Image (cartoon, rainbow, N blue to C red):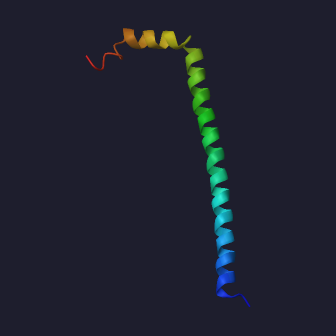
Amino acid sequence: MIHGADFISIINSFVQGGLKAVLWADTLQMVIMIGGFATAAITGIVNQGGLANILEDARVSGRLDAFK
């Protein structure tokens, strides 16, 4: 027969295991998302010919004049 303290110990181990699984899943998701963001940013910069070209295009089109 399971006593109160044993039951609490069993539930606690399940909760800790579940939290550990959630932390690992969230960590993996964060790594994948940061990798995707970095890939998208790098691909966009390369496709536009570099960061200098992007900033020049933004300056010419007036997009950098937000605070004037």
Give the tally of numbered discs. Answer: 0
| Residue 15 drawn above or below residue 47 | below
Residue 10: give x, y in percent of width and height: 69, 76
Q: Quadrant of the C terminus?
A: top left
| Residue 3 drawn above or below residue 46 | below
| Residue 18 drawn above or below residue 46 | below
Q: Quadrant of the N terminus?
A: bottom right
Residue occupying image coordinates x 57% and y 32%: 37
Q: Based on the displayed image, in which of its 4 quarters is residue 2 positioned?
A: bottom right
In the image, farthest residue toward the bottom: 1
Instruction: Left or right? Give the position of 38 relative to 14.
Output: left
In the image, farthest residue toward the right: 1
Residue occupying image coordinates x 62% and y 45%: 29
Instruction: Left or right? Give the position of 41 relative to 66.
Output: right
Q: Based on the displayed image, in which of its 4 quarters is residue 11 positioned?
A: bottom right
| Residue 67 drawn above or below residue 27 | above
Residue 36: give x, y in percent of width and height: 61, 33
Residue 23: give x, y in percent of width and height: 63, 53
Q: Based on the displayed image, in which of its 4 quarters is residue 5 positioned?
A: bottom right
Residue occupying image coordinates x 35% and y 16%: 64
In the image, farthest residue toward the left: 68
Residue occupying image coordinates x 69% and y 70%: 13
